[in-house]
Amino acid sequence: MWGLDGSFQVNFPSDCSFRVSKQYKVNYSSRVAGNIQNGSISGLEGVKVKILFAWINIREVDLNGGELRMHAGSVSKSFSLDHFSTSPQCKLTRLHCKI
């Protein structure tokens, strides 16, 4: 579902887990929502990353040249767009999720 103000909501049949850059485990909830504005997603809900032993919510994603910068709490990390050139294969549910 898309709003005229840039808001969106996506509903998946189940949660989706996959790895980014072979180092970080990312999880989509069955509901993902946020606001898309000029190369960024803010107010992101339903996406989290596992850092060490804790799951941290990703609240914002920015596009900067050939990289995506993800903001999770006070931590942010940039990844080459090459890591997102294909839809990841979700673990267990075998769903295809897009970033």
Image (spheres, grey):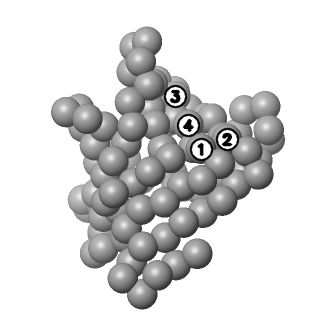
**Contact, CB < 8 Å: mark 4 with mark 1?**
yes
C-alpha distance separating marks 4 and 3:
7 Å
Location of residue 32 in the rendering, given as x and y in whole percent from the top left corner: 54, 55
Quadrant of image for the N terminus: bottom right
**Contact, CB < 8 Å: mark 4 with mark 3?**
yes
Counting residues from the start of the chain, the first of labels 2 and 1 encountered is 2
SS at circle 4:
strand
Image: 6 above or below 53: below
Query: Which residue is tagged 4?
Result: 27
**Contact, CB < 8 Å: mark 2 with mark 1?**
yes
Q: Residues within 10 Å of mark 3 (few under 14, many from 20)?
A: some
Quadrant of residue 6 within the rendered picture: bottom left
C-alpha distance separating marks 4 and 2:
7 Å
Q: Is residue 18 left or right of residue 89?
A: left
Q: Amino acid at mark 1?
A: Ser
Nearest the camera: 97 or 8? 8
Which disc is residue 90 wearing?
Answer: none
Query: Which residue is tagged 3?
Result: 25
Which disc is residue 29 wearing?
Answer: 1
Image: 96 above or below 75: below
Q: Amino acid at mark 3?
A: Lys
Residue 77 visible, this angle: no
Q: Amino acid at mark 2?
A: Asp
C-alpha distance separating marks 2 and 1:
5 Å
Q: How many numbered callouts?
A: 4
Query: Which residue is tagged 2?
Result: 15
